[in-house]
Image (tube, grey):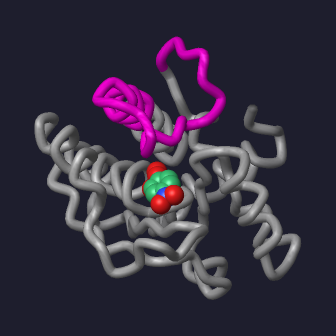
């Protein structure tokens, strides 16, 4: 749920020239690079690419330097998204570089809150599922890593909806 305070922060960002958003999951090879690719497509479709800086990172470092998971790349490509992000781990400096740091699940969110250098930086942390617009029983983006094809499709469905919701939240 988006709190009143979070809503106020989103409204202040909606009035700014630039929006810098970092998507964060555990491995940075499935959910967050997919969110990154989908969000790039959403802002391009709205003719707003110049306003948005979009990136992704993982709380864990096991896959640093790698392309996204092959299964996610295949499922995303079928929907027209080419995922070419190179995996990296989230770092403290990201709290300076980004206005919004959006966690895919509660574990990611907890880890980010621990990392935030200041209370002001902590207010940049949001939960991706809070932007989902479609009817959904998910209050997080489920980790597809140990799932089959339907797990990847579910993640893409949820992320497409959340990216549109995020775009709308930041557009006046
Ligand atoms: P992601 O998925 O957090 O959506 O990128 C995962 C990728 C790798 C692992 C776990 C989750 N892993 O344990 O290596």
Relative to 165, is 112 on the left or the right?
Answer: right
2 or 114, which is in the foreground?
Answer: 114
Q: Which residue is rendered at x = 59% and y = 55% of the image?
A: 102
Look at the image and say whether residue 164 sits in the magenta stretch: no
Quadrant in which the N terminus appears? top right
Q: Which residue is rendered at x = 33% and y = 24% of the image?
A: 150
Q: Which residue is rendered at x = 44% and y = 77% of the image?
A: 88
Range of residues picked out in magenta: 134-159
- Give coordinates of residue 140: x percent, y percent: 62, 35
- Give coordinates of residue 85: x percent, y percent: 28, 68
Answer whether residue 108 is visible to the viewer in this image: yes
Does residue 94 sit above or below 127 in this rendering? Answer: below
- Give coordinates of residue 121: x percent, y percent: 76, 72
**Residue projecting furthest to the bottom:** 93
Does residue 151 sit above or below 117 in this rendering? Answer: above
Look at the image and say whether residue 146 sits in the magenta stretch: yes
Q: Which residue is rendered at x = 36% and y = 64% of the image?
A: 51
119 or 137, which is in the foreground?
Answer: 137
Q: Quadrant of residue 3?
A: top right
**Residue projecting furthest to the right:** 119
Relative to 21, is 99 on the left or the right?
Answer: right
**Residue projecting furthest to the top:** 135
């Amino acid at each position: 749920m988006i709190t009143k305070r979070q809503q106020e922060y989103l409204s202040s960002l909606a009035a700014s020239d630039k929006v810098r958003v970092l998507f964060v999951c555990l491995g940075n090879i499935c959910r967050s690079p997919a969110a990154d690719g989908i969000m790039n497509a959403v802002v391009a479709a709205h003719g707003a690419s110049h306003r948005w800086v979009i990136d992704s990172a993982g709380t864990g470092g096991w896959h640093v330097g790698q392309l996204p998971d092959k299964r996610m790349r295949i499922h995303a490509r079928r929907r027209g998204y080419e995922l070419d992000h190179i995996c990296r781990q989230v770092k403290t400096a990201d709290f300076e570089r980004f206005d919004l740091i959006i966690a895919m699940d509660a574990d990611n969110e907890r880890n980010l809150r621990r990392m935030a250098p200041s209370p002001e930086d902590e207010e940049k942390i949001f939960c991706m599922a809070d932007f989902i617009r479609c009817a959904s029983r998910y209050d997080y983006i489920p980790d597809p890593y140990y799932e089959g094809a339907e797990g990847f499709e579910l993640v893409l469905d949820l992320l497409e909806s959340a990216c549109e919701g995020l775009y709308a939240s930041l557009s006046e």
